[in-house]
Amino acid sequence: MPTFNAAPHLARSLAPLVPAVADGLVRELIVSDGGSNDDTIAIAEGVGARIVTGRRARGAQLIAGAAAAKASWLLFLHADTALADDWCADAARFLAQPENGMRAGAFRFAFDDSSFGAHVVTFWVAVRNRMLALPYGDQGLLISRAFYDSLGGYRDLPLMEDVDFVRRIGRARLLMLNAHAVTSAEKYRRDGFGKRSRRNLVLVARYFMGANPSDLAKRYD
């Protein structure tokens, strides 16, 4: 889990993982922090997470977290995303199928918001996943270590590290799981659901057309 000043959301995001630790599904919980100066580290340590520190860049933080992991399966999750209660059973079924050793699973997208704008964005995310097989990082990613390594892992990109990796996984090797990843809508409420969605779409389109991720990151910030 990559973090930077994630304290407002971190307890909510970590809570669904704790029972999975007790059940043995989650063997290690790694928080890859980019220099937080709030209570992020204290919250993570409070649930027994291992802390990895480095420069603030989500691609680099994901790489560092994966490098520190010792388990044969990896689950990447954003710090403002909480998995729904049924995620453990869903993930366990995925892990139990041998053919999934060379596939990856992403969760279905949801907001912690019931407004009309949230429903509209959620609908179009589902369309994007169905038509393009392009889940973003806020949907989590479940992947075996062997498959992750065979693809070269995440790249140290300032933006679009999730899109880059999912494109290398490919449609045929990507499965949408049944459980939901519930993401905070705080940024969408602040910027406007329509405005933020359009901005993200433009950035992804520019990336597909060859724009430099560093330039896109400046626009994103």
Image (cartoon, rainbow, N blue to C red):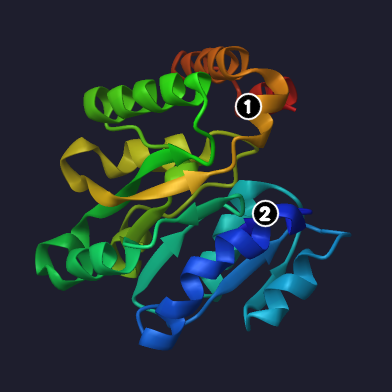
Tell me the residue that label 1 is attached to.
188
The answer to whether the residues at label 1 and label 2 have Cβ atoms under 8 Å apart is no
Image height of 132 relative to 57, above or below: above
Q: Earlier in the sequence, mark 1 or mark 2?
A: 2
Q: Position of residue 201 (x, y in %)?
A: 50, 16
What is the CA distance from the residue labelled 1 to the residue labelled 2? 15 Å
Tell me the residue that label 2 is attached to.
9
The crowd level at tag 2 (other Cα within 10 Å; few <14, some 14-19, many 20+) is: some
At 48% across and 71% down in the image, what residue appears?
17
The crowd level at tag 1 (other Cα within 10 Å; few <14, some 14-19, many 20+) is: some
Q: Is residue 170 left or right of residue 115?
A: left
Q: Position of residue 203 (x, y in %)?
A: 56, 18
Q: Position of residue 125 (x, y in %)?
A: 38, 27
In which quadrant is the N terminus drawn? bottom right
Hey, what amino acid is under mark 1? Tyr
Hey, what amino acid is under mark 2? His
Q: Where is residue 149 in the image (x, y as percent from the top left)?
A: 37, 62
